[in-house]
């Protein structure tokens, strides 16, 4: 059970990093800063991989979360990186990460008690 919590914590750590980019940047500044774009891409890949390690029954408890899309964005960043635009990355950073953070925090709270 404790090992199952590791990916949740990893996701939260990466979301905090994405928030640090968002909080000090605008979309225009983000897309012209290749270091931030690369760092954000890496964090999103880590999140994608960590979601794959969350038990399926835990994911099933949150049917409104786009788990499939979260899993596949990692593959797109690794294998089709030229097709992932800065607009998509910024959308993840600026809004979707907040939604995922709330879900993961709830999941962590439920399973820490177990």
Image: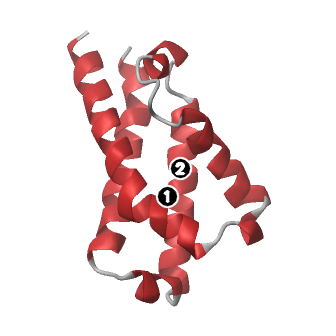
Decide: is 24 above or below 99.
below
| Mark 1, secondary structure of its residue | helix
Residue 14 appears in view: no
Check disc 1 and report the residue beneath it: 43
Q: Is residue 47 left or right of residue 5?
A: right
Residue 4, how many percent across, how many down? 43, 22
The quadrant of the image that shows the C terminus is: top left
Per the image, the residue denoted by label 2 is 46
Residues at marks 2 and 1 touching, judged by CB atoms closer than 8 Å = yes
Quarter of the figure with residue 108: top left
The part of the image, by quadrant, that contains residue 28 is bottom left
**Residue 56 seen by the camera:** yes
Residue located at (56% from left, 43% from top):
70
* Colour scheme shown: secondary structure
Find residue 38 and report its horizontal and vertical position in percent.
Answer: 56, 73
Distance from the alpha carbon under mark 2 to that under mark 1:
5 Å
Residue pictured at 38% horizontal, 14% vertical? 1
* Residue at 42%, 88% in the rendered image: 29
Q: Residues within 10 Å of mark 2 (few under 14, many from 20)?
A: some
Measuring from the top left, give residue 106's x and y in whole percent: 26, 29
Residue ID at (47%, 22%): 59
Q: Which residue appears farthest toward the top when viewing the image?
A: 114
């Amino acid at each position: 059970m404790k090992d199952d919590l590791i990916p949740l914590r990893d996701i939260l750590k990466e979301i905090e990093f994405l928030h640090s980019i968002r909080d000090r940047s605008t979309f225009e500044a983000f897309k012209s800063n290749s270091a931030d774009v690369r760092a954000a891409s890496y964090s999103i890949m880590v999140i994608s991989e960590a979601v794959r390690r969350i038990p399926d029954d835990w994911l099933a408890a949150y049917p409104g979360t786009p788990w499939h899309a979260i899993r596949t964005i990692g593959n797109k960043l690794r294998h089709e990186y030229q097709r992932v635009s800065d607009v998509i990355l910024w959308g993840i950073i600026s809004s979707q990460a907040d939604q995922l953070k709330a879900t993961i925090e709830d999941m962590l709270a439920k399973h820490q008690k177990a």
